[in-house]
Image (spheres, rainbow, N blue to C red):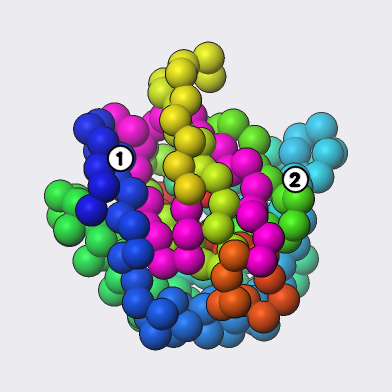
Amino acid sequence: MMTTNQGFFLLKSRLTKAVQQEILAAARSVVIQAPLFRPTMANGQSFNYSMTNCGELGWVADRHGYRYQQVHPETLSRFPAMPQVIRDLAINLAKETGNDNFDPESCLINLYRKGEKLGMHQDNTEKNLSAPIISISLGDSGVFVLGGFLRTDETKHYIVQSGDIIVMSGESRNFFHSFKGTVPNTSNLLKDGGRLNLTIRQVN
Ligand code: MD6
Ligand code: FE
Protein backbone atom coordinates (compact mmCIF):
# COMPACT_ATOMS: atom_id res chain seq x y z
CA MET A 1 0.00 0.00 0.00
CA MET A 2 1.20 3.47 -0.77
CA THR A 3 -0.24 6.26 1.27
CA THR A 4 0.52 9.85 2.00
CA ASN A 5 -0.89 11.55 5.04
CA GLN A 6 -4.11 13.56 5.02
CA GLY A 7 -6.33 10.56 4.22
CA PHE A 8 -5.16 10.09 0.63
CA PHE A 9 -4.43 6.49 -0.37
CA LEU A 10 -3.17 5.06 -3.63
CA LEU A 11 -3.47 1.29 -3.38
CA LYS A 12 -1.36 -0.05 -6.25
CA SER A 13 -2.50 -3.29 -7.93
CA ARG A 14 -5.24 -3.73 -5.32
CA LEU A 15 -7.52 -5.67 -7.69
CA THR A 16 -6.68 -8.97 -9.34
CA LYS A 17 -7.29 -9.34 -13.06
CA ALA A 18 -10.31 -11.53 -12.29
CA VAL A 19 -11.86 -8.87 -10.05
CA GLN A 20 -11.11 -6.18 -12.63
CA GLN A 21 -12.97 -8.26 -15.22
CA GLU A 22 -15.89 -8.74 -12.86
CA ILE A 23 -16.17 -5.00 -12.23
CA LEU A 24 -15.82 -4.27 -15.93
CA ALA A 25 -18.69 -6.67 -16.69
CA ALA A 26 -20.80 -4.94 -14.04
CA ALA A 27 -19.95 -1.53 -15.53
CA ARG A 28 -20.87 -2.76 -19.01
CA SER A 29 -24.29 -3.88 -17.78
CA VAL A 30 -24.81 -0.40 -16.33
CA VAL A 31 -23.82 1.28 -19.60
CA ILE A 32 -26.33 -0.85 -21.53
CA GLN A 33 -29.14 0.39 -19.27
CA ALA A 34 -27.83 3.92 -18.74
CA PRO A 35 -25.89 5.00 -21.86
CA LEU A 36 -22.71 7.05 -21.61
CA PHE A 37 -23.28 10.77 -22.23
CA ARG A 38 -21.11 13.85 -22.45
CA PRO A 39 -21.85 16.28 -19.62
CA THR A 40 -21.78 20.02 -20.23
CA MET A 41 -20.76 22.92 -18.04
CA ALA A 42 -23.09 25.78 -17.14
CA ASN A 43 -21.61 27.79 -20.04
CA GLY A 44 -22.64 25.04 -22.48
CA GLN A 45 -19.11 23.78 -23.11
CA SER A 46 -18.79 19.96 -23.14
CA PHE A 47 -16.61 18.04 -20.73
CA ASN A 48 -13.81 16.15 -22.42
CA TYR A 49 -15.00 12.61 -21.56
CA SER A 50 -18.16 10.51 -21.36
CA MET A 51 -19.96 9.38 -18.24
CA THR A 52 -22.90 7.60 -16.70
CA ASN A 53 -23.93 6.45 -13.21
CA CYS A 54 -25.43 3.67 -11.17
CA GLY A 55 -26.86 3.66 -7.68
CA GLU A 56 -29.67 5.61 -6.02
CA LEU A 57 -28.22 8.89 -7.23
CA GLY A 58 -26.14 9.97 -10.19
CA TRP A 59 -23.95 13.01 -10.70
CA VAL A 60 -25.03 15.05 -13.73
CA ALA A 61 -23.86 18.30 -15.30
CA ASP A 62 -25.70 20.48 -17.76
CA ARG A 63 -26.58 24.13 -18.40
CA HIS A 64 -28.28 24.29 -15.01
CA GLY A 65 -25.12 23.26 -13.19
CA TYR A 66 -23.90 20.20 -11.26
CA ARG A 67 -26.17 18.07 -9.10
CA TYR A 68 -27.19 14.57 -8.05
CA GLN A 69 -30.45 13.15 -9.35
CA GLN A 70 -32.17 9.77 -9.59
CA VAL A 71 -32.72 9.72 -13.35
CA HIS A 72 -30.48 9.55 -16.41
CA PRO A 73 -30.59 12.98 -18.11
CA GLU A 74 -31.35 11.54 -21.57
CA THR A 75 -33.46 8.42 -20.97
CA LEU A 76 -35.13 9.93 -17.88
CA SER A 77 -35.12 6.43 -16.35
CA ARG A 78 -33.81 5.75 -12.86
CA PHE A 79 -30.10 4.93 -12.84
CA PRO A 80 -29.61 1.15 -12.46
CA ALA A 81 -28.87 -0.19 -8.99
CA MET A 82 -25.22 -0.30 -8.00
CA PRO A 83 -23.96 -3.83 -8.76
CA GLN A 84 -23.27 -5.73 -5.54
CA VAL A 85 -19.64 -6.39 -6.47
CA ILE A 86 -18.97 -2.63 -6.70
CA ARG A 87 -20.91 -1.84 -3.56
CA ASP A 88 -19.18 -4.51 -1.44
CA LEU A 89 -15.75 -3.58 -2.74
CA ALA A 90 -16.30 0.11 -1.95
CA ILE A 91 -17.42 -0.66 1.61
CA ASN A 92 -14.40 -2.92 2.16
CA LEU A 93 -11.98 -0.35 0.75
CA ALA A 94 -13.50 2.34 2.96
CA LYS A 95 -13.04 0.09 6.03
CA GLU A 96 -9.51 -0.81 4.98
CA THR A 97 -8.58 2.88 4.94
CA GLY A 98 -10.15 3.70 8.28
CA ASN A 99 -13.56 4.85 7.06
CA ASP A 100 -16.29 2.82 8.79
CA ASN A 101 -20.02 3.30 8.12
CA PHE A 102 -19.54 4.25 4.46
CA ASP A 103 -22.88 4.17 2.62
CA PRO A 104 -22.33 3.97 -1.18
CA GLU A 105 -25.20 5.90 -2.75
CA SER A 106 -23.69 6.73 -6.11
CA CYS A 107 -21.15 5.36 -8.56
CA LEU A 108 -20.03 7.70 -11.31
CA ILE A 109 -18.50 5.93 -14.31
CA ASN A 110 -16.16 8.03 -16.46
CA LEU A 111 -14.77 6.83 -19.79
CA TYR A 112 -11.61 8.48 -21.14
CA ARG A 113 -10.64 7.72 -24.69
CA LYS A 114 -7.31 8.75 -26.20
CA GLY A 115 -6.67 12.46 -25.55
CA GLU A 116 -9.60 12.88 -23.13
CA LYS A 117 -9.05 14.35 -19.67
CA LEU A 118 -10.61 16.07 -16.68
CA GLY A 119 -9.42 19.47 -15.46
CA MET A 120 -8.52 20.59 -11.95
CA HIS A 121 -11.56 20.47 -9.64
CA GLN A 122 -12.81 19.78 -6.14
CA ASP A 123 -15.62 17.29 -5.60
CA ASN A 124 -18.15 19.41 -3.76
CA THR A 125 -21.56 18.60 -5.25
CA GLU A 126 -22.15 16.11 -2.42
CA LYS A 127 -24.02 17.28 0.65
CA ASN A 128 -21.68 15.12 2.71
CA LEU A 129 -18.13 16.41 2.25
CA SER A 130 -16.56 14.19 4.89
CA ALA A 131 -17.44 10.69 3.62
CA PRO A 132 -14.59 9.14 1.60
CA ILE A 133 -14.57 8.85 -2.18
CA ILE A 134 -13.44 5.48 -3.52
CA SER A 135 -11.97 5.49 -7.02
CA ILE A 136 -11.33 2.43 -9.20
CA SER A 137 -9.14 2.57 -12.32
CA LEU A 138 -9.67 0.06 -15.15
CA GLY A 139 -8.00 -0.18 -18.54
CA ASP A 140 -5.30 2.11 -19.84
CA SER A 141 -2.93 3.79 -17.39
CA GLY A 142 -3.12 7.52 -16.83
CA VAL A 143 -1.88 10.41 -14.78
CA PHE A 144 -3.79 11.53 -11.69
CA VAL A 145 -2.78 14.90 -10.25
CA LEU A 146 -3.37 15.75 -6.60
CA GLY A 147 -3.17 19.30 -5.27
CA GLY A 148 -4.35 20.83 -2.02
CA PHE A 149 -7.17 23.01 -0.71
CA LEU A 150 -6.23 25.84 -3.07
CA ARG A 151 -6.17 25.64 -6.86
CA THR A 152 -2.67 27.16 -6.72
CA ASP A 153 -1.26 24.62 -4.23
CA GLU A 154 1.68 22.46 -5.27
CA THR A 155 0.67 19.23 -7.04
CA LYS A 156 1.89 15.64 -7.11
CA HIS A 157 1.52 13.38 -10.14
CA TYR A 158 0.60 9.70 -9.73
CA ILE A 159 0.46 7.03 -12.41
CA VAL A 160 -2.80 5.09 -12.03
CA GLN A 161 -2.97 1.65 -13.62
CA SER A 162 -5.72 -0.89 -14.13
CA GLY A 163 -6.58 -2.37 -10.74
CA ASP A 164 -5.29 0.57 -8.71
CA ILE A 165 -7.52 2.21 -6.11
CA ILE A 166 -7.52 5.77 -4.86
CA VAL A 167 -9.26 6.70 -1.64
CA MET A 168 -9.72 10.37 -0.86
CA SER A 169 -10.77 10.76 2.75
CA GLY A 170 -10.01 13.05 5.67
CA GLU A 171 -8.50 16.35 4.60
CA SER A 172 -7.68 15.13 1.11
CA ARG A 173 -11.39 14.55 0.46
CA ASN A 174 -11.65 18.19 -0.54
CA PHE A 175 -8.31 18.63 -2.32
CA PHE A 176 -8.12 19.85 -5.89
CA HIS A 177 -7.25 17.11 -8.37
CA SER A 178 -7.34 16.34 -12.08
CA PHE A 179 -6.88 13.53 -14.57
CA LYS A 180 -4.35 14.48 -17.24
CA GLY A 181 -5.16 11.72 -19.68
CA THR A 182 -4.41 8.14 -20.58
CA VAL A 183 -1.32 6.42 -21.89
CA PRO A 184 -2.82 4.52 -24.86
CA ASN A 185 -2.23 0.79 -25.31
CA THR A 186 -1.08 0.12 -21.76
CA SER A 187 -3.83 -2.39 -20.94
CA ASN A 188 -5.84 -4.98 -22.82
CA LEU A 189 -8.71 -5.03 -20.30
CA LEU A 190 -11.00 -2.80 -22.40
CA LYS A 191 -11.13 -4.27 -25.87
CA ASP A 192 -11.50 -0.85 -27.53
CA GLY A 193 -8.85 0.74 -25.28
CA GLY A 194 -9.37 3.73 -23.03
CA ARG A 195 -9.76 4.04 -19.28
CA LEU A 196 -12.78 3.62 -17.06
CA ASN A 197 -12.80 5.35 -13.70
CA LEU A 198 -15.48 4.48 -11.17
CA THR A 199 -15.96 6.82 -8.22
CA ILE A 200 -18.20 5.59 -5.44
CA ARG A 201 -19.64 8.20 -3.10
CA GLN A 202 -21.89 8.75 -0.18
CA VAL A 203 -23.84 11.85 -1.19
CA ASN A 204 -25.90 12.51 1.94
C1 MD6 B 1 -10.32 10.13 -12.60
N1 MD6 B 1 -11.14 11.09 -10.61
O1 MD6 B 1 -9.53 9.45 -11.94
C2 MD6 B 1 -10.99 11.29 -11.99
N2 MD6 B 1 -12.54 12.53 -7.67
O2 MD6 B 1 -10.57 9.89 -13.76
C3 MD6 B 1 -11.71 12.01 -9.81
O3 MD6 B 1 -12.09 13.07 -10.22
C4 MD6 B 1 -11.82 11.69 -8.40
O4 MD6 B 1 -10.49 9.73 -8.53
C5 MD6 B 1 -12.67 12.33 -6.36
C6 MD6 B 1 -12.09 11.27 -5.73
C7 MD6 B 1 -11.35 10.38 -6.44
C8 MD6 B 1 -11.21 10.58 -7.81
FE1 FE C 1 -13.00 14.33 -8.73
Which disc, if any, is residue 94?
A: none
35 is higher (above) or lower (below) than 165: below
Residue at (42%, 56%) from the top-left corner?
135
- Residue furthest to the right in view is 44
**Amino acid residing under circle 2:** Phe
Residue marked by disc 2: 47
Residue at the (26%, 47%) spot, across then down: 2
Give percent across and percent down for residue 125. Answer: 51, 40
Out of 195 and 13, give the one closest to the viewer.
13
Q: Quadrant of residue 12?
A: bottom left
SS for callout 2: loop
Nearer to us of marks 1 and 2 is: 1
Res 8 label: 1
Q: Which residues are magenta?
A: 160-185
The stretch drawn in magenta includes residue 178: yes
**Foreground pick, 186 / 190:** 186
| Label 1 vs 2, first from the N-terminus | 1
Kindly indicate the quadrant of the structure image that contains residue 74: bottom right
Q: Is residue 66 in sight in this rendering?
A: no
- Outermost front residue: 186
